[in-house]
């Protein structure tokens, strides 16, 4: 947990330097569950939720159970663009991670 916290807060410093005024994506293994059990901690979950609020980001994968990989992007990417989220390897037979795909439904 101490190493995780150190890495997380280092990333927050980077976000505060890089994100203002930009459209951004955060895609990958955050090692945080946003649904159900607060893995690794409520503090980690709340910290990233605060980042999402501060920079107007949408965590499209927040409601997926038992999931640590996420697709978070600037909410402006989703304005007037409905999206669908698809998962595979839900049973985790191929890997210990779910597969994720975000698809914008542009006309």
Image: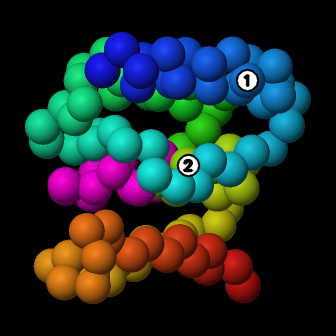
On residue 37, the disc is none
Looking at the image, residue 99 sits to the left or right of residue 8; the answer is left
Chain part drawn in magenta: 59-69
Q: Residues within 10 Å of mark 2 (few under 14, many from 20)?
A: some
Q: Residues within 10 Å of mark 1 (few under 14, many from 20)?
A: few
Who comes first in sequence, dot 1 or dot 2?
1
Residue 19 x %, y % = 78, 30
What colour scheme was applied to this rendering of the protein? rainbow
Q: Is residue 61 magenta?
A: yes
Q: Is residue 90 above or below residue 45?
A: below
Quadrant where the N terminus is found in the figure: top left
Q: Is residue 3 above or below residue 28?
A: above
Task: Name which residue lies at 74% across and 45% down.
Answer: 24
Q: Is residue 56 magenta?
A: no
Looking at the image, residue 38 sits to the left or right of residue 16; the answer is left
Residue mark closest to the camera, 1 vs 2: 1
SS label for mark 1: helix
Circle 2 is placed at which residue position?
Answer: 72
Asked if residue 46 shows in the view, the reply is: no
Quadrant where the C terminus is found in the figure: bottom right
Residue 39 x %, y % = 22, 35
Q: Quadrant of residue 12?
A: top right
On residue 14, the disc is 1
Task: Name which residue lies at 63% across and 32% down.
Answer: 56
Looking at the image, residue 37 sits to the left or right of residue 74; the answer is left
Task: Name which residue lies at 85% across and 37% down.
Answer: 22
**Residue furthest toward the front?**
3
Residue in front for this viewpoint, 42 or 80: 42
Distance from disc 1 to disc 2, alpha carbons, whole Å, reads 16 Å
């Amino acid at each position: 947990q101490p190493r995780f916290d150190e890495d997380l807060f280092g990333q927050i410093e980077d976000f505060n330097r890089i994100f203002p005024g930009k459209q951004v994506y955060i895609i990958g293994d955050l090692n945080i569950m946003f649904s159900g059990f607060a893995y690794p901690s409520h503090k980690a979950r709340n910290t990233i939720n605060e980042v999402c609020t501060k920079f107007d980001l949408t965590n499209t994968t927040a409601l997926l159970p038992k999931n640590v990989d996420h697709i978070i992007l600037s909410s402006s990417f989703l304005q007037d663009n409905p999206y669908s989220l698809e998962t595979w390897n839900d049973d985790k037979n191929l890997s210990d991670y779910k597969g994720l795909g975000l698809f914008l439904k542009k006309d």
